[in-house]
């Protein structure tokens, strides 16, 4: 269970948002909305613990995440704006490196299976630099299936995805939520997931 | 613990693989070292006595500048492509992953300098046992240069014109390593024994290895915020 209370984010001398509270139980999902520059990415980075809030606190299962350390990081999978892929490595090598970073050593077969799941199996051995934007995004999202994290935090995951990719992500999110996972997502496009996403509007 | 080690080794292997794919990056600092060390004999003329006097200093300054050259890329690409965020969010402590990166960085940029140094030392007419001391001093010294330099690289992450700033920030901190490193070779040439200098250099390595990773990690976290 993720509880964030009275979060405030300050950039320079500008307050992006204040008094934002989030409560997310197992199986629940949240869609964060707001105009460009409203602080959606900042909120997500605060929730995963990359940046501290100016005020307020984020707690996981009743404990502040700052004191949980790796016990919290184990539960979180974060996909930011950047794909976190190395252009010179192949898609398979990238997926395996990402899994190692997430604390799981996986065999090539498992990485290939994950890439098949996201539909880039034909490009699995090509250097990522030669992949299209959408294929890169899919490769980056393949991390979700491998990390075994309970909380997924996705920043504009639909960017660059085609219709098939959007449907795949919606189905993957539904399956994740049904199995008791949590998700926080930002998106400017509608997300055709069956699960009811609560909506949080910031900066309004 | 083994999981932390596995993550650190994973980062090191990934960086080594990347270096294999982009050989130009790794070779650039080695060639820089070779060229700098070769320009001095050409520019100063072939007087054996003078060359032997300046040899240790020139080789050490060359290694130092070659290391500076490699620092700009140390964390920048991970920062730009979002990998650094994922490293900070890894269950393994960031400091362990940083150590993995530094180990790979030394293998790719530091070790080649140590290997090339004996060949370059021949241009300066250094005797065999002096060359052995030079190699020993670089073996102890290049990790110090990498560790201290990485602090500068982490502090200037995301800063425009960071490359020049790193040099300004880090070069003064390199002075002790330079003094004891080149001093060890000089002392051997003068026949006074290099042990004292090498011991101090070794002590410097221990101190840097203990403190630098924490400083680097703190600087990276600030850059990520």
Image: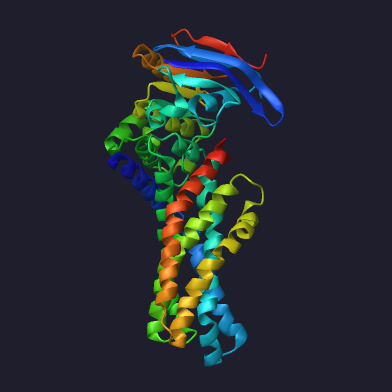
The residue depicted at 39 percent of the width and 32 percent of the height is A70
Q: In the rendered view, does A67 fall on the left or right side of B178?
A: left
Q: Is residue A157 visible?
A: no
The residue under the point 39% across, 19% down is A172
Q: How many marks do you count on the picture?
A: 0
For the point 46% across and 79% down, the residue is: B185
Coloring applied to the structure = rainbow
Image quarter in which the C terminus of chain A is found: top right
The residue under the point 56% across, 52% down is B153
Q: Where is residue B125 in the image (x, y as percent from the top left)?
A: 47, 87
Q: In this view, does B38 lie above or below A122?
A: below
Q: Which of B120 and B140 is in front in this view?
A: B140
Residue A198: image location, x then y, percent: 51, 9
Using the rendered view, name the quadrant where residue B112 is placed: bottom left
Quadrant of the rendered image containing residue A168: top left
Residue A112 in sight from this viewpoint: yes
Answer with left or right where residue B174 lies relative to residue B191: right
Identify which residue, A52 or B65, lies in the foreground.
A52
Residue B46 lies, in percent from the top left, at 56, 90
Q: Is residue A176 above or below residue A135?
A: above
Percent position of residue A18, x then y: 64, 18
Quadrant location of the N terminus of chain A in the rendered image: top left
């Amino acid at each position: 269970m993720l509880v964030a209370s009275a979060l405030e984010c300050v950039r320079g001398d500008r307050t992006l948002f204040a008094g934002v509270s989030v409560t997310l139980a197992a199986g629940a999902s949240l869609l964060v909305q707001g105009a460009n520059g409203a602080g959606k990415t900042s909120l997500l980075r605060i929730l995963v613990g990359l940046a501290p809030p100016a005020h307020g606190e984020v707690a996981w299962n009743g404990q502040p995440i700052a004191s949980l350390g790796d016990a919290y990081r184990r539960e979180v999978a974060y996909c930011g704006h950047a794909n976190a892929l190395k252009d010179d490595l192949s898609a398979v090598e990238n997926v395996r490196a990402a899994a190692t970073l997430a604390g799981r050593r996986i065999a090539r077969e498992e990485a290939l299976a994950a890439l098949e799941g996201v539909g880039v199996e034909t490009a699995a051995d090509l250097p990522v630099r030669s992949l299209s934007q959408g294929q890169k995004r899919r490769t980056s999202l393949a991390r979700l299936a491998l990390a075994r994290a309970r909380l997924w935090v996705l920043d504009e995951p639909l960017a660059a995805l085609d219709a098939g990719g959007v449907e795949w992500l919606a189905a993957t999110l539904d399956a994740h939520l049904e199995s008791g996972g949590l998700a926080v997502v930002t998106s400017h496009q509608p997300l055709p997931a069956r699960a009811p996403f609560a909506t949080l509007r910031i900066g309004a | 613990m083994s999981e932390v080690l596995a993550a650190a080794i994973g980062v090191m292997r990934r960086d080594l693989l990347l270096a294999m794919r982009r050989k130009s990056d790794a070779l650039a600092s080695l060639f820089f070292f070779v060229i700098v060390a070769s320009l001095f004999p050409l520019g100063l003329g072939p007087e054996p006595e003078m060359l032997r006097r300046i040899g240790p200093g020139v080789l050490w300054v060359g290694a130092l500048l070659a290391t500076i050259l490699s620092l700009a890329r140390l964390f920048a690409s991970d920062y730009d492509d979002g990998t650094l965020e994922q490293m900070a969010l890894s269950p393994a402590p960031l400091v362990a992953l940083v150590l993995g990166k530094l180990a790979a960085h030394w293998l790719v940029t530091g070790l080649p300098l140590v290997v090339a140094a004996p060949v370059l030392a021949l241009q300066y007419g250094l005797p065999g046992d002096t060359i052995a001391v030079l190699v020993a001093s670089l073996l102890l010294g290049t990790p110090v240069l990498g560790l201290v330099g990485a602090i500068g690289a982490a502090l200037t992450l995301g800063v425009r014109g960071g490359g020049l700033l790193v040099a300004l920030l880090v070069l003064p901190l390199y002075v002790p390593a330079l003094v004891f490193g080149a001093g060890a070779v000089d002392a051997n040439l003068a026949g006074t024994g290099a042990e004292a200098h090498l011991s101090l250099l070794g002590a410097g390595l221990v101190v840097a290895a203990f403190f630098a990773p924490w400083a680097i990690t703190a600087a990276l976290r600030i850059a990520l915020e």
